[in-house]
């Protein structure tokens, strides 16, 4: 059995760890609240833009003229893969990395060239080890999501698609479903696919034409989609870290209770042994 000094040292260590996990949970919770507000403010805007595009398509307008809607034989794919810059967030990064590796393996098994744009340091490190280094460093976007940064990334990939360097672009990210659930999603970003809606619901005066309006809206729609995914991933990261730190704190409290019990038992046993020694000495 460990000595009282050893048990006391472990108790001190666990208490110090609990202070850290509790503080990290509070920070993650505050960041989650901020991220929820950000994604909550963005979704209505994206929903409205989707409604406008779907309505215009429902009136017979086509997106086929857009260079971002061209479908062709898939010989080269770009993956935009999202992760966090830091760890201590449960399986958040591991799940996304596992999915990206799976997708890369499937495409390369078919002879398709794959380029991975890593958004987040953990994804970039994993892809570098898998011999798929990111063409540029987008770690800052994971830590500080911004529309300007998302637009720069979107433009680079959109230009690659338009020039024919990529025949398809997919997004792999963790979606914020709830604080307890962040499923990993895989979505096709390019070529663009928008379902047509009920054109009768749209009552707009459009100049110079609906076709030109759609061609103007599509690049904005794509940039907005990427920014929304960035915000979604950020919220999912903070949710995962909040849960992970809460779990760590709960486990730490259980360990602390067990160690305190062991310490009290050992101390009591030590006192009992000393009393027996004293009593035995007096009898002699």
Image: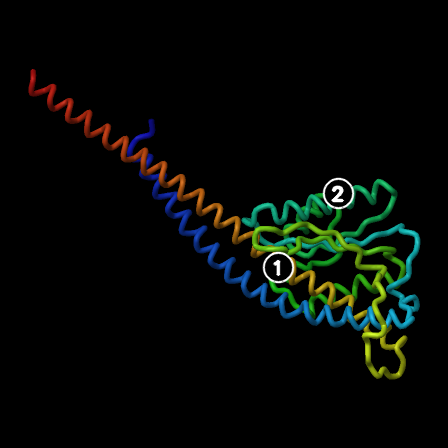
- Which image quadrant: the N terminus? top left
**Left or right placement of residue 193 versus residue 25 in this view:** right
Residue 102 is marked as 2
199 lies above or below 265: below
Disc 1 or 2, which lies upstream in sequence?
A: 2
Measure the C-alpha gap from mark 1 to mark 2: 23 Å
Which residue is tagged 1? 234
Residue 267 coordinates in the image, percent (x, y): 24, 33
Q: Secondary structure at mark 1?
A: helix
Q: Outermost residue toward the top?
A: 284
Name the residue rendered at 54%, 63% in the picture: 33
Name the residue rendered at 86%, 64% in the picture: 68
**Within 10 angstroms of label 2, few (less than 14), some, or many (20 or more) residues?**
few
136 lies above or below 274: below
**Within 10 angstroms of label 1, few (less than 14), some, or many (20 or more) residues?**
many
94 lies above or below 190: above
Closer-to-camera residue (251/223) = 251
Closer-to-camera residue (229/4) = 229
**Left or right placement of residue 210 versus residue 179 in this view:** right
Image marks 1 and 2: residues in contact by CB distance under 8 Å:
no
Closer-to-camera residue (23/56) = 56
Residue 60 coordinates in the image, percent (x, y): 92, 71
**Left or right placement of residue 138 versus residue 249 in this view:** right
Residue 2 coordinates in the image, percent (x, y): 33, 29
- Which image quadrant: the C terminus? top left
């Amino acid at each position: 059995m460990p000595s009282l000094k050893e048990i006391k040292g472990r108790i001190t260590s666990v208490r110090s760890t609990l202070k850290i996990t509790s503080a990290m949970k509070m920070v993650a919770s505050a960041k989650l609240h901020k991220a929820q507000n950000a994604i909550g403010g963005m979704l209505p805007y994206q929903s409205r833009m989707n409604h406008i595009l779907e309505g215009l398509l429902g009136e017979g307008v086509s997106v086929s003229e857009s260079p971002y809607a061209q479908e062709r034989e898939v010989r080269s794919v770009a993956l935009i893969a999202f992760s966090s810059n830091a760890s201590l967030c449960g399986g958040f990064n591991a799940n996304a990395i596992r999915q990206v590796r799976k997708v890369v393996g499937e495409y390369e098994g078919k002879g398709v060239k794959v380029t991975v744009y890593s958004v987040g340091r953990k994804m970039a490190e994993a892809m570098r080890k898998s011999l798929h280094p990111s063409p540029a460093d987008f770690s800052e976007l994971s830590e500080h999501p911004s529309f300007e940064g998302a637009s720069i990334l979107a433009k680079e990939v959109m230009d690659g698609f338009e020039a024919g360097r990529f025949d398809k672009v997919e997004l792999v990210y963790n979606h914020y479903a709830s604080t307890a659930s962040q499923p990993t999603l895989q979505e096709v970003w390019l070529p663009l696919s928008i379902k047509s809606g009920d054109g009768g619901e749209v009552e707009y005066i459009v100049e110079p034409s609906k076709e030109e309006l759609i061609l103007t809206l599509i690049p904005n729609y794509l940039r907005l989609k990427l920014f929304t995914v960035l915000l979604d991933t950020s919220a999912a990261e903070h949710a995962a870290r909040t849960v992970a730190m809460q779990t760590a704190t709960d486990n730490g409290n259980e360990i602390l209770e067990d160690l305190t019990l062991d310490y009290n038992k050992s101390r009591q046993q030590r006192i009992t042994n000393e009393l027996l020694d004293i009593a035995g000495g007096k009898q002699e």
